[in-house]
Amino acid sequence: MLRGIDVMVYDIQDVGTRSYTFISTLGLVMRSCARAGIEVLVLDRPNPLGGLKIEGPIVQDGYHSFVSQYKIPYVYGLTVGELAGLINEEGLNRGQQGNEPPLRCRLNVIPMRGWHRSMLYRDTGLPWILPSPNIPSEESALGYPSAGIAGEYGYLQIGVGYTIPFQVFAAEWIDADALKARLDSYHLPGTAFRTIHYKPLSGSMAGKLVHGVQFFYTDYEAADITLTQFYVMQAVNELYPDHCPYPLRKTRMLDIVCGTDYVRVKFGERMKVEDIVEYWNKDIDSFRTVSQKYYLYR
């Protein structure tokens, strides 16, 4: 398949979250090109989540997949060019299941001009070109790590199938005002909620009137964006314990998205964020130390 190729060019907009599979494709391309002796040229793109936000645990052995290919946090704070350098040099490119030896390719990254680590996509002044149908705007890219895991639990509508994917949490049986009041009582840093009522256009709740909250980050730097969904699930459980999703049917998918079974098991005991927050944050400092070696921007 690679016969006759001199240089493999990777020019794709990523969204900055581990489970979004474009970076997994990059790794597989790098492995194949390493075997074939082909140079990989990465045209760098902005990370829509910025270059400072790092959240979530690294993937544990036994939980590697196409949505959890590398031992990196759920939100990793690197551009795709920086990430390519890290996985190439740190021996992270072990293949989809993590049981193949790492391979290093001849990697060349063409850096951006004018991008700084504190910039979100909206700060670049560039038009947003949707990388996939469910990421139609930079707001959806920001919301993806905040709602996508909750979507795997399957009992909340998160806007996929409507006009604001990954920006809401809703269900037919939720009292929107009560949910907003409960979430407001948590005083989550940098996070605000408003009530919303809508009918999804597709999916399991298509055509049904659902009620819930839309979330916004009033101080993105202060917000723990990946924990937003867990606080919502905690609030929903406190208000509607009969709708608790446990026991889960799709446990494997949830575990590989989180990169571990610890989050599912521990959170499922009481549906309290305080039970998982220490584990969720345990790898941030160590990963930041390692990843800083591959920064192309300040």
Image (cartoon, helix red, strand yellow):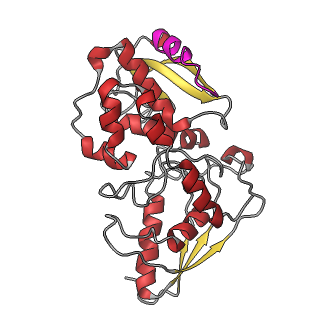
Place of residue 255 in the rendered image (x, y in percent of width and height, measured from the top left): 32, 45
Residue appearing at x 69%, y 68% in the figure: 111
Residue drawn at x 31%, y 30% as measured from the top left = 268
Q: Is residue 78 visible?
A: no
Residue 61 in the figure: left or right of residue 85:
left
- In percent of width and height, residue 67 lies at 38, 54
Q: Which residues are magenta?
A: 178-190
Residue for point 27% across, 15% down: 242
The answer to whether residue 112 is above or below residue 55 is below
Q: Position of residue 223 (x, y in %)?
A: 61, 33
> Is residue 108 visible from the viewing direction of this image?
yes
Front residue of 295/176: it is: 295
Query: Which quarter of the picture shows residue 148?
Result: top left
Give the quadrant of the C terminus.
bottom right
Coordinates of residue 192 in the picture (x, y in percent)? 60, 23
Residue 177 magenta? no
Q: Quadrant of residue 208?
A: top left
